[in-house]
Image (spheres, grey):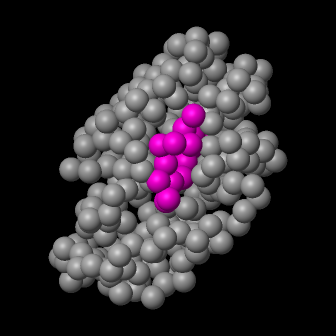
Amino acid sequence: MPNYPLLLRPDNFPAVGVLQKLLNRGGARLTVDANFGPRTRQAVIDFQRPRGLRADGIVGLDTWPRVSALANLPIMDCVDVWDPLLVRDTEAPLQGVGGNPSVIGGMCNGVEQAISMIRSASPGNVFLLRFHGHGAPGVASVATGQGELDPNSQERSDIFSDPRILSMLAGLRSIFGPYGCIQFMHCQTGRGRAGRSLLSRIADVVGVPATAAVDDQFGLGFGNLPFGYNGPTVTVVPNGGNLAGWARSLPDFPGMSVP
């Protein structure tokens, strides 16, 4: 059973653009813009109905494996388990659908540990890398052993401004395929100027779009907690690019019969 992204209206981030490309290989004629609007929802329903899937227009555990069949789109997760609740609400559900999350927590070199684990576990051609933890505007926690659950912690809020950390992050460039993107599943990480600044630094260094939530993340129901966003998001494309333009530039998937 594969891992999956939860995608539904009105999501607007890179994974939706990849979904639109997948739907188009089966005959949909969507404008690829990474915006899950009414036409994309209808295309999902049109895909679900003849395959006996629940025709709800939501791409989740049952629909993602079918719509992405025969496409090589690995998903990786990195979970900060400094907070035991993340073990229950994030690590366990990911494992329950066949995911194998990299787990970090309480280490004095948490960022370096996380990057090393991701690189060693990467199958290559990664489509989606998700980070799970606690956040605040412009903050995505990675365990440092320095009280990082405090949103006012200087260590935590400035960690991605450190040239050494940014240099480490550049090591992730090699794991991504042509559809690669990063999602931060933390509360409020993308909020305001600080959020956009954080995402911009990461996108430019890693070379793929970075997305984060604007509001608190309470999940979309039991079992969906790690897989999708609750509310609006912000995405920054490397080098000041445009999300819709990035989505249009994605390579097409070869046309084929999808089971």
136 or 3, nearer to the observer: 3
Lateral position of residue 154 relative to residue 13, left or right: right
Residue 211, how many percent across, how many down? Answer: 61, 51
Q: Position of residue 208 (x, y in %)?
A: 60, 52
- Name of the residue lying farthest toward the right: 193
Q: Nearer the viewer, residue 111 or 156?
A: 111
Q: Is residue 168 magenta?
A: no
Q: Is residue 179 magenta?
A: yes
Quarter residue 112 falls in: top right
Depicted 136 relative to depicted 240: above or below: above
141 to 244, vertically: above or below: above
| Res 9 visible | no
Closer to the camera in the image, 227 or 257: 257
Q: Residue furthest front?
A: 174
Tell me if residue 221 comes above or below residue 27 in the rendering. above
Give the x, y percent position of residue 190: 68, 47
Residue 145 seen in render: yes
Q: Residue at x 67, y 48 (%)?
A: 203
The quadrant in which residue 122 appears is: top left
In the drawing, does residue 192 fall left or right of residue 178? right
Above or below, 177 against 174 in this view is below
Q: Residue at x 62, y 54 (%)?
A: 209
In which quadrant will I find the C terminus?
bottom left
- Relative placement, left or right, of 94 versus 9 is left
User: Which segment did they paint magenta?
Assistant: 171-188
Q: Residue at x 19, y 77 (%)?
A: 51
What residue do we see at 26% from left, 51% from top? 2
Q: Position of residue 85 (x, y in %)?
A: 43, 27
